[in-house]
Image: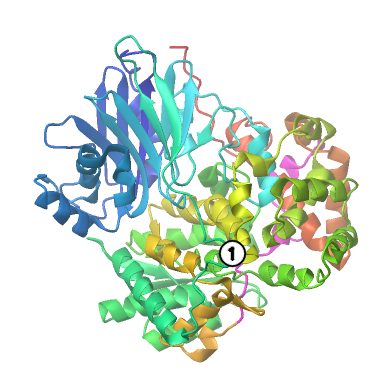
Amino acid sequence: MCGIAGIIDLSGARPIPPGILTRMAGAITHRGPDEDGYLEEPGIGLANRRLSIVGLFDGKQPIYNEDRSVVTVFNGEFFNYPEMKAQLEARGHVFRTHCDTELIPHLWEDHQEGMFEHLKGQFAIALWDRKRHVVILARDRFGICPLFFSTQGEWLLFGSEIKALLASGLVRAQADLRGIDQAFNFFAIPGPSTCFAGVTALQPGQYLRIQLPVSGQPAKIEKKYYWRIDFPDQGQEDHSTDPRKLVDEFERVMLGAVERRLRADVPVVSYLSGGIDSSLVVAMAAKIRGTPIPTFTIQIMDPKLDETTQAAVVSRHIGSTPVVVQVGDNEVLQSYPELIRAAEAPVIDTSCTALLRLARSVHQHGYKVALTGEGSDEWLAGYAWFKIHRLLGMMDWMPGIKPSYWLRRMILWGMGAPAGSAQAMDRVYETVRSYTSYQDIYAIMGMSRLRFYSSETLDKLKDYSPYLELEPNFDRIERWHPINRAVFWAGRVHLPGQLLSLKGDRVAMNSSVETRYPFLDEEVFSFLARIHPSWKLRGFRDKYILRLLGERYLPKEVAWRPKGMFRAPLDSFFDHQVPAFVEQLLSDESLKKTGYFNIQAVQFWRDKVRNKQLSRQQKSSVELGLVAVVTTQLWHHLFIDGSLADLSNHLPQRAAAL
C-alpha cells in the first residue's frame, strides 16, 4: 500500500503551485515511508509515498507505459499481478519493473475504462493519459483503499487522506454536517460526504473520468461506476442440496483468496482473534505455506471482552505463538487523539483504538502486511442483529399486519428514546422501502441525534437523508432475498464506512501496515452472492457454510463457536479517571463554540452516566451517543478549531489564493 496525491488544472495548463506536491505527499508520509516520487508538468501534478511490498527495488512511482504517454500513481495491491503480467507480455507489452503498479498503464492502453474488470485487488488509482488529455481517479470494488477529492476554483485536488488536501493550502478545513450526521446514523461515514465541507469520498467501485480542456472545449468531470454490489433475484439463487460439493467449491475459492494475499516480497503476518473468520484465514495460510505465519492478537483487559483464551486454542492447533497486545481503559483514552487524527472523523467504536495499537505492534516487530478476517460477518449474516431481525420478522405472519413494527417502537421507547424517534423510524421505513437488520441497529444509534443535537443542527439537517446520499437502487434491492438486502447495507455502509476505514486502512496505515482481506476477494464474494441465503443464516445459526468449511481446518469448538462481538469498553470516557482533554471538550464553552450539540442535554446525560443513574436498557444507547459527542468535539478541535482543549492539533496554514 502507499499514499497518492495530486492536483489538476481544470482550466488548461497552468504551472503547478510551487511546493504543493511535496506538502501533500509529506502529510501522508506514514502511508509510504520507503520513498517518494513525483510528476509535475503544466496542468497536472502527481505524487506518491511508497510502502514497498512488491518489486522492492524497482517499483518507484510514477510508472509509465513504453512511450511514456500514460503515467500512473497507485495505492494498493493487484493480487492477480503474475497472471495479468504474463497475458500482457504475450500481447507484446514490455515491463520495465517487477512491481504490480505497471499493470495499470498497459491495461489502459488495451482497454481504457474497461481495464477495471481485469484488476483484482485493493486499489486507489490516478492515471494521466497525455494523448487523450484524460485523468482517471478510481477506487476498488469494496472500498478498501480510500480516495478523496475536492474542487477549489479551477483546481481539482485528490489524495489518499484528507490531510493531503488540507496540506495543499487550497482546501480550507470547514465542517460538513452531513458527514457528522452519517456518524450519528451509521456509526461510520461511508460517504460520499465527509466531515469536511467541499471534500468528497470517491465511492467503492467508482471512478472519475476527467476530460481536460482540448480544442476549445471546457473540462468535463464524470462520475461512473464500473461495479456495484448485486445479488440474484429472490428464488434465482443457487439452491444446491449437496453440502459437500458446495463446501468444496467454497474451500477452493477461499484457498485461492488466501494464497493470492500471501503474495509479497516481504513477510506476511495475520491478525488472530478467537473467532472462526481470522482463525480460518490463519489455518489456510499455514496449509498453503507449509508452516504457520506470525500472528498478532488483541487482549482487551476486561474478562467479559477478552478473547485471548479462544485465540490460544487456534494458535496451538496451527503451531504458532501469537504476539499479544494488551488494551485497557488507559490505552483507549490515551490513544483517542491519535485515532481521530488518523481517521479524520469522529470514531464511536472504541475498539478502533485496539486495532490502532495492534497495527503499531506489527510495525514495531518489523512487518508491513497483515491478513484479517473482515468481510465474513457481512457476507454471511454473522452479526446478532441478523438473528434479532429474523426473530422479529416471525411475528409478521399475517399479510398486511406488522406486529414487529410496533414492537420495534416499544423497544425504542424502553431504551429511553427521545421525542421524535418514532417519526424518525417511520421516515427510514419510507425511504429504504425494505427494512432490514441494519436499519434496526442504526435506529439505536440514530436516537442520539435527537437526544444530543442542538436545534440549529437539527434544522440544518432536516432535509438530509444519509440513505439517499448513497444512491441505492431500491427497485433492484427489493428483488433480492431479505437476507441479501441486509448484506447489501453491510457491504455499502458498514464495510467501507467503518471496518475498512476506521478499523482498517486508517489505523493500519497510520503505522505503515497494509491489511489484506481474503473474504473480500472478488471470487469469494461472487460465490457467496449467488448461493441461497440459507447457507449463510440457517435458522438462527450464522455463517453456516463457513462453519462447515471451518471443520476441515479447525477444532470443532472453534468452527461452531458463537459469534463474539469484538469491542472495547464504551464507558472509558466517563466511568474512570477522565483525562483533562475530555473535560475540556465537554465544557459548556467548547460545546458552545462548535454549536453541534444541546449543552444542557449533554451535561444532563453525562451526569446520569457518572452517577450510574441509567437503566440497563438506556445504558448502551446513551453511552454510544456520548462517545459520539466527545469524538466529534475532538475531531473539531484537531482539524477545525484548536482552542477546545489543551491538545496539539492538525491545522495547516491556508495558502494565498492562486
Residue 283 on image: x %, y %: 38, 80
Image quadrant in which the C terminus is located: top left
What residue do we see at 50% from left, 27% from top?
A: 652
- Residue at image location 59% in from the left, 63% down from the top: 484
Position above or below: 126 against 30: above
Mark 1 residue crowding within 10 angstroms, few (<14) / some (14–19) / many (20+):
some
Q: Is residue 145 above or below residue 158?
A: below
Q: Is residue 61 left or right of residue 628?
A: left
The residue stretch that appears in magenta: 562-589
Front residue of 222/561: it is 222
Residue 13 is at least partly visible in this image: yes
Horizontal side of 656 relative to 117 (left or right) equals right
Q: Where is residue 170 in the image (x, y as percent from the top left)?
A: 47, 21
**Count of marks overlaid on the render:** 1
Q: Quadrant of residue 226 in the image?
A: top left
**Extreme residue in the bottom direction:** 556
The residue labelled by disc 1 is: 234
